[in-house]
Image: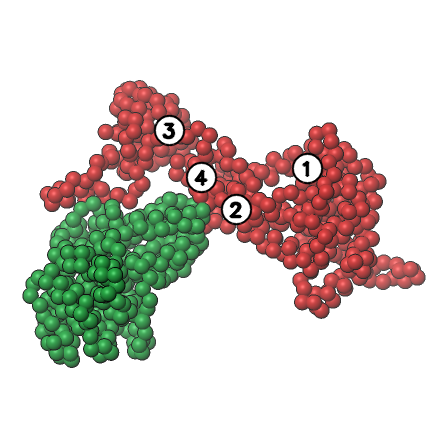
Amino acid sequence: MAYPVIMPKTGMSMEEGTILRWLKKEGEEVAKGEILLEIETDKTSMEVEAEASGRLLRILSKEGEVVPVTQTIAWIGQPGEVLQEGAGVAPATAATSGPAAAPAAAAAAPEAAALPVAALPPVPGEVPATPAARRRARELGLALDGMSGSGPFGAVRLRDLAAAGPGPQGSEESAAGKALQGMRKAIAEKMVRSWQVPSPTLITRVDVTELEQTRRSLNAAGGLKISFTDLVIKAAAAALGEHPRLNSSLEGERIVLHGQINIGLAVALEDGLAVPVVRGADRLSLRRLSETTRELAGLAREWRLTREQSSGGTFTVSNLGMYGITAFTPLLNVPESAILGVGAIQEVLRFDDQRQVVARQVLELSLTHDHRHIDGAPAALFLQAVRRLLENPLALLM
Amino acid sequence: MREITYAQAIREAMSEEMRRDPKVFLLGEDVGVYGGAFGVSAGMIQEFGEERVRDTPISEAAITGCAVGAAITGMRPIVEIMFSDFLTIAMDQLANQAAKVRYQFGGQAAVPMVLRAPGGSGTGAAAQHSQSVEAWVCNVPGLKVVIPSTPYDAKGLLKTAIRDDNPVVFLEQKLLYRTKGPVPEEEYTLPLGSAEVKRPGRDLSLVSYGRMVPRSLEVAAALATEGIEVEVVDIRSLRPLDTATLVASARKTGRVLVVHEAPQFGGFGGEIAAAVGDSEAFYYLDAPIRRLGAMETPVPYNRHLEAHVVPTAERITAAVRDLLK
């Protein structure tokens, strides 16, 4: 019969203790009287001895966990025994039958709903995860390898993948901070890789007065919802066709030009960032492109992008204009070689051809490029091409 | 809308169907002069007479056998078994005859009968008069099984059951007989095999039926004050089972707790859990599917123990919290 190891009450005032260190691992043999673990109370730290001999079947409370006194923290027993988690109750065998046994059965099995815990060793190479977490990991293109989840048996759950995902609970935060995990961790690692690439940012000012008028009249006339970002993607896609070097990756010692122009669009999430990809952006009509970006951005905000929809980008557009940012220095979405930042539209006074002061709408574009294989001049030529397209809406729409 | 009790709703359903179709009649122990052990058929003998509201001897096998014979010869009998526990005595007629006649005679005969029987604990009637026996009859192809949780559902589902050409086991809930709810004056029916979301929510699907539905709704309302949104799905009909509604709810919330009054082990909750686990909803589950049924014991006579062995509001709440932890 399995024997529960409980958090001992070592003093009258002790209500909880912290697990400092387990000296035995799950599956190890323990003898009665052997030191099993070290705990810490608010006053002192101490060792806890095993009160039974057998095998340490399961550790329920990990190191660092704070556990109320008398709560079961582990089980000692024989291999293969089926455990039932309860408040220190040794696992009951199937309830006996017969009316005389009824009250006893009722008392012994109050938590029949508690899941029986099979004391099985972990499966090598397998990460326990809920079906929902596996599905989302696939969609996000994340590997579960090495992840340790917050669920029972260390199962990875939705919240472990996206600390700020649209799950029912928020992320687990404590005074000690919040674990860097899931998407947040993936972004952190990617940004560090990006930072290692020498990548300056060029900034240019674009007059979008005509473009903005064209956009408004197109939307009004055609019942469309073309956004400014759509127009920038359209212009960038067209310019990339003329400047294929910006649509490439430095892979090891080789510069790989990408055949397709797949433009990623940075979409802000609550505590994260998704970059859905518009495939073949140079071949889409403005209407189709606009529908695609709207659909993808919506899916991204609901964390529903498939792996297909969030991978394979060759160039990225990031718009922070809606936050009033005028220009910035975007970091490369490696292994891509360039990223275009879009600033806020501003009303300015300018001289026209006759040196008359006129009110115009302008915005600033910020192009960060991989200087290892793209020098300043070719990057500037590309940015100039984007600017010309945006300043000449008819050319853009051709 | 007017409010009537669960018992009144059942009486209305029977009376309306008896007025509509002369083939429909009621038989059972004390259903006539006494008006039924729980008063469900009170006054019906005055309206329909002894021919159509028949008091029978105390023999569930004979009552059910009579009904099977009457149904085969063209009548539409409604049997009342005083306590669903006594289905054991009617079981040969129900499981071996009623459920199989249509199949074994190649469709040449049908058994359009309804067997009504109250179930559930909570009345101090002890172990032989307090059981929830739905799982016993759900494993019999050929039977339909319905357990309503509101007066509205009871009336609409019973009328459909009476009109059905197959035997329907209609399990009423003793503790709900006196509960009131809105029931329209005008005629309506509800289809069998259609679950209802009794309360929408995003965090967890609490799937239940019968008396545990109102209890689940109370739990859901209490948890809502803490921002936990529990969706309560009342399956209403166990056979046929509306899997689509279950799957849609489980897909939405990613967590499923099944609650019923019958013993958990071997209970119908396992069928619900399997229906969810064996569907598209599996890929949306973020926690194991949990069941909560009665403990592994006959229903105790002691009223404190009796109340304790079935899922209590506290245990339902704890199970919800545990799944959301």
- Amino acid type, residue under disc 4 in the picture: Ala
- In space, the residues marked 1 and 4 are separated at their CA atoms by 30 Å
Nearer the camera: disc 4 or disc 2: 4
Q: Earlier in the sequence, mark 4 or mark 2?
A: 4
Whether labels 3 and 2 belong to a single chain: the reply is yes
Q: Earlier in the sequence, mark 1 or mark 4?
A: 4
Q: What label does residue A129 carry, if any? A: 4
Residue denoted by label 3: A121
Up the image or down, B180 lies above or below A83; here it is: below
Q: What label does residue A164 carry, if any? A: 2
Residue A53 x %, y % = 27, 22
Let me know if residue A117 appears in the view: yes
Q: Report the chain shown in red.
A: A
Residue denoted by label 1: A335
Along the line of sight, the residue nearer the viewer: B36 or B100: B100
Q: Earlier in the sequence, mark 4 or mark 3?
A: 3
Q: Chain of mark 3?
A: A
Q: Chain of mark 2?
A: A
- Amino acid type, residue under disc 2 in the picture: Ala
